[in-house]
Amino acid sequence: MEESPTLGKRKELEEESAVVETGNNQETNSNKRPKESKNLEDVKATPTQETVSNRRSLTRTCVHEVAVPAGYTSTKDESLHGTLSNPVFNGTMAKTYPFTLDPFQQVSVSCLERNESILVSAHTSAGKTAVAEYAIAMAFRDKQRVIYTSPLKALSNQKYRELSQEFKDVGLMTGDVTLSPNASCLVMTTEILRGMLYRGSEVLKEVAWVIFDEIHYMRDRERGVVWEESIIFLPPAIKMVFLSATMSNATEFAEWICNIHKQPCHVVYTDFRPTPLQHYVFPVGGNGLYLVVDEDEQFREDNFMKLLDTFAKQKQIAGHRTLNGKSSGRIAKGGSGSGGSDIYKIVKMIMERNFQPVIVFSFSRRECEQHAMSMSKLDFNTDEEKDTVEHVFRNAILCLNEEDRELPAIELMLPLLQRGIAVHHSGLLPVIKELVELLFQEGLVKALFATETFAMGLNMPAKTVVFTAFKKWDGDSHRFIGSGEYIQMSGRAGRRGKDDRGICIIMIDEQVEMGTIKDMILGKPAPLVSTFRLSYYSILNLMSRAEGQFTAEHVIRHSFHQFQHEKALPDIGKRVSKLEEEAATLDASGEAEVAEYHKLKLDIAQLEKKMMSEITRPERVLYFLLPGRLVKVREGGTDWGWGVVVNVVKKPSAGLGILPSRGGAYIVDTLLQCSPCLSENSSRPKPCPPRPGEKGEMHVVPVQLPLISALSKLRISIPSDLRPVEARESILLALEELGTRFPQGFPKLNPVKDMSIEDPEIVELVKQIEELERKLYAHPLHKSHEVDQIKCFQRKAEVNHEIQILKTKMRDSQLQKFRDELKNRSRVLKKLGHIDADGVVQLKGRAACLIDTGDELLVTELMFNGTFNDLDHHQIASLASCFIPGDKSNEQIQLRTELARPLQQLQDSARRIAEIQHECKLEINVEEYVESTVRPYLMDVIYCWSKGASFSEVIQMTDVFEGSIIRSARRLDEFLNQLRAAANAVGEVTLESKFSAASDSLRRGIMFANSLYL
């Protein structure tokens, strides 16, 4: 392993750095830089707020660290640039600002002037853009080029507009649009940069800086690898600026950059908010707001307890109604409920108290629209503002043709916008989405109903932010919003220089643990974890690179994934040494006898497991899973012990749960003893059993049938309402009391005698278990007092087992796993004819090298097996749409014959490719691969659009959002252009013209209307 970089010493930093952490009274170091003058909101603060403002101006600090390669010595002039651990800049600034820079911005500028890479990690709205602009100004001053990358095309368009106003010589490259490609500052998506790096673009020879905006996007499972590869491929001469939301392992990321590029990388981190926030909770169905975290980030426990009381009162009222023969019914969050809409109440209150503009975040696009439509009685704008909105609206839709201007999605929006209310989500027509952003920036939209994507990118703050829910569906389960997500979205509250504080309101519709809310608001942001994976596109491009300096092995070895793995190894080594010392001290005399006893227990456990897999079939077990039944739960190697059945439902559970990858459709809601902390899995937090010595909490956890490892004869009564903590605590006490009554373990249901199962196989299993149990009970150790001896042997066995696992982990480096995967993927490429036996890229491989929008293996298969040859360009456009990821339609797909046959060929080819990958030892489920790769939801829509149908006609053909259709069509156009380039590269002239015609047939009307930002 290469020598890892060293971190700039923290002690030295605290003595020298311009801005240091010194407890509560943090301030700028006066001998290094003049104290920061009070800025606008401090000066304007009213006397009652003066003390808070003054205290906050003292705490406006940042942490600066630097990762330095081993043996590196700086050659910078210290009088001009300071030292590595204390960068200062005393020269002429490349850019001046109309405001005093915050400490983190000052330190960042000093690092940039040293011509060294930097990661700036700060909250939304903290002012990271100022740092990016300084890097661009430096490049312009030094007659160099600079690249600005962002994760999304829409963000790139916005950034292009913003930077063009500031710098003039700015270009844009997004795959959809190319403007001024020879400009000094190029804004592009990260995919475009990676493509340029693969193909050795000449542009890069003149580039001095690359700015990676929203670098925390590297966590994205699908696209995170694009960032990682781009960073690895960048020439060492190019310096990087990384802008990120706050993350807990910023230093580790900087060490990786330093490790792969052998250059210092600074970290400037601040979690200071220029405008303090107050966090309120609104109980659904209630009337009041409860301040749970104040502007000094103090959790108000007294208010939280009052909040819990309101839930108890609501429950009493609901119970009283039910007793009187009325069904209570849940009060609707957005629509009609007995007390009217809660969202309406909150927005009205915000308007009355002058707390607008407000952003209302929902985690469903349809919900956003419903909430906005329920505001029909509210009007935020004056007559003059209404006229301005109409004028801007009419000008914006001039880019559309007459017919498209009459679309319901456009016509219905004007009355809403005139009242200062708007919707923003990815399913909107792009022209409307951009219009909403522009009106919001101009202060003409006062109440914006948005999804979380609005929290990314440009600085568009509001005074108030409302969360309509504190749980979200992440594709796997309903889970609480993570601390990092909450920080990102709540960061939109509080406009610098305008508001003395920002307001966040969280709506909650169920009783919630104090720790959950506390962790969400005050918790640490999530770490940046690598999602590196090998793709065929990358492997083929690396194999075909002329200079050969980068190989797939090189990329694997230098990935952030491998860096994080190797960083953990020393800790594993220490743990192994500790365990080996413990094993040496454990004396297990009479091991043979103990081993025999231990084996009997293991054999019984294995037979019971086999028997339970038969017993837990729904038709056998459901009758016995009544509320109160004690069941034992085991998930893989995790033993949850005994729990209590609460309910059984026939559907996949929504919420936190322990669910195996595959299992029945029945969920057993079970009261289990859980650790107060969720498992540390950032992608999907899960409950876990309490650690030894830890006081557990009882929670209802959804469990699938296959995880039940034993059924007891015992049933206990459970309270009708398990939401109060006391109710669940009483169950825990009851279980502990039963444990003392049954020291040998709870009596289990006998499948034959108690459950009347007569299956010969189960009868035989019961006999075998009973025989082994007789031997176990007769064994001298069973009733002996040599408990310590047994425990000692068991502990020794456990220690040795853990040592084996850890040693395997050390030996079985991630590097080896990726090498094996690379070998298997290369086999697939050979079988499909992309490379020859010597690894030389063939014609088919050269085509696949140019395709990164869709599945490169599958589409080249269609190009070479003649599927495309038999289709006209309309059918080609339609078939190619299956490769574009997008929204799933819920409607039944019924295709006309001219599309059904090509779709069948596509599915057959996909199945064949999946089978070949499976044969080559890649972990792949054939049917899942076909389903996830072939997405025929827009085939009809694209076919009719290609043949000349109007947009109003094609949107009637699907339930997919209009904006999603347009986004897919634009991505399809990009894909068809890649196919055209691939056909050109392999000399397929006829195919090239078909792909070109297919692309041309899409490029018209509202589908390809210009962005308002361009």
Image: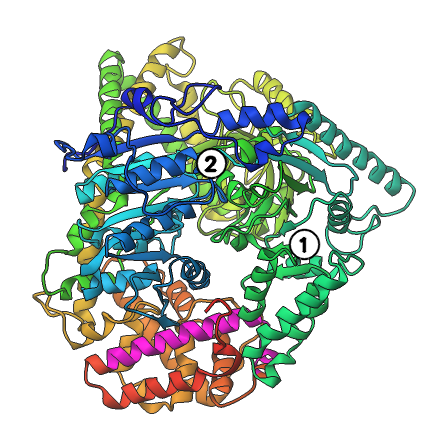
Which mark is in front, 1 or 2? 1
Q: Mark 1 points at which residue?
A: 446
Which image quarter holds the N terminus?
A: top left
Kind of residue sitting beneath label 2: Arg
Is residue 24 placed above or below 106 in the rendered structure? Answer: above
Q: Is residue 981 magenta?
A: yes
Residue 319 lies, in percent from the top left, at 84, 38
Q: What SS does tag 1 mark? A: loop
Out of 522 and 660, give the one closest to the viewer: 522
Q: Is residue 316 magenta?
A: no
User: Is residue 515 among the parts visible in the rendering?
Assistant: yes
At a point 17% along the width and 41% down the height, the residue shown is: 262
Which image quarter holds the C terminus?
A: bottom left
Residue 152 lies, in percent from the top left, at 42, 60
Dominant secondary structure of the residues highlighted in magenta in the image: helix
Q: Left of 157 or right of it: where is 984?
A: left
How many angstroms separate mark 1 from mark 2 (CA)? 52 Å
Q: Left of 845 or right of it: where is 503?
A: right
Is residue 227 placed above or below 77 in the rendered structure? Answer: below
Mark 1 or mark 2: whose residue is earlier in sequence: 1
Q: Name the residue under label 2.
A: 634
Out of 330 and 648, give the one closest to the viewer: 330
At a point 74% along the width and 56% down the height, the residue shown is: 380
Is residue 624 placed above or below 397 in the rendered structure? Answer: above
Q: How crowded is mark 1: few (under 14 residues within 10 Å), some or many (20 or more)?
A: many
Is residue 232 placed above or below 74 in the rendered structure? Answer: below
Contact, CB < 8 Å: mark 1 with mark 2? no
Out of 564 and 625, give the one closest to the viewer: 564
Query: Bounds of the magenta span?
Result: 954-983
Q: Quadrant of residue 787?
A: top left
Residue 181 lies, in percent from the top left, at 30, 69
